[in-house]
Image: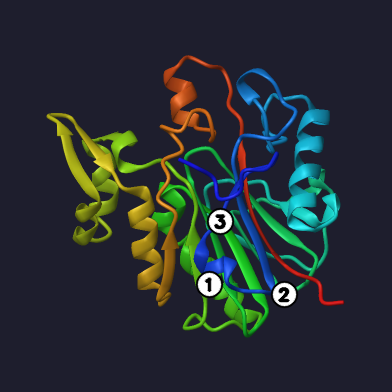
Amino acid sequence: MTPVNSDTLPIIQAKALSTIPTIGHAFFTRQGGVSTGIYSSLNCGFGSGDKEENVSENRRRTSDKLGVTPPSLVSVYQVHGTNIVTVEEPWDRHAAPKADGMVTRQAGLALGILTADCTPVLFADQEAGVIGACHAGWRGALDGIVEATIGAMEVLGAARSRVVAAIGPCIAQKSYQVGLEFRDQFMVRDTQFSDYFIDDDATHLRFDLGGFVALMLGRAGITEIENVNIDNCSESETLFSYRRTTLAGEKDYGRGLSAITLKSVN
């Protein structure tokens, strides 16, 4: 996997968002930061066991890359739910609300999602000047985090027919082994969801999380969807992965940042 940019803070970008002049966005890699050891090096998660000063510096670097001040890069306390926050001004990180999605129409703010296997999804309606971001793990995706984010954007004036959505790096099907009972939680909702599972062995399956998120976006009425199709679990040098570090016996893991911002108009 080769990031789009190869400078000291490499990023991955979606073409669908890169063509919108009023939008800035990035799926950051784990490279270009100051953290060490298992957090090496661009760990942006204060919820990890990393040194606070390292995470702060890493987030400062990502803020600079996005063209916003460090306090204007906001993130939430993610809980694998479907709650969405409308952001009007930055908050102190210690007061971050429990949610898994954010929307705003305020220029100069960056909405940041932290992931290490789950799916970051970035949204933009250029005409309305509304952006959104959500954290879609399997549970949140199944319970409606995508629909909830789009609905919150509509409250701010967006139209789902105009919304562009980009799916960032997440655990790929080849790396996502699950038990048979895992699929049952999907099948009770819709038997079509079986299309996102393939047999692995007698007692295990492989789940396509990114594909499932794309399905939910399409069902929500989004027609312009881009999936960067990068498996963070297998990209040990460039992306963080909870599953990979767990299988390796590590006690903790770094968190990667994905963010989107409305550029300020001077």
Spatial CA distance of label 2 from label 1 is: 13 Å
Q: Nearer the viewer, residue 209 or 100?
A: 209
Spatial CA distance of label 1 from label 3 is: 21 Å
Tag 1 residue: 150
Q: Amino acid at mark 1?
A: Ile
Labelled disc at residue 105: 2
- Which marked residue is nearer to the observer: mark 1 or mark 3? 3
Labelled disc at residue 13: 3
For marks 2 and 1, the one nearer the N-term is 2
Packing grade of label 2 (10 A; few <14, some 14-19, many >=20) is many
- Asked if the residues shown at circle 2 and circle 3 are in contact, with their CB atoms under 8 angstroms apart, the answer is no
Q: Amino acid at mark 2?
A: Arg
Q: Quadrant of residue 131?
A: bottom right
Q: Nearer the viewer, residue 95 or 166?
A: 166
- In the rendered image, the residue lying farthest to the left is 202
- Asked if the residues shown at circle 2 and circle 1 are in contact, with their CB atoms under 8 angstroms apart, the answer is no
Q: Amino acid at mark 3?
A: Gln
Residue 96 locus on image (x, y percent): 75, 49
Vertically, is 132 above or below 79?
A: below
Give the residue at x 56% y 17%: 251
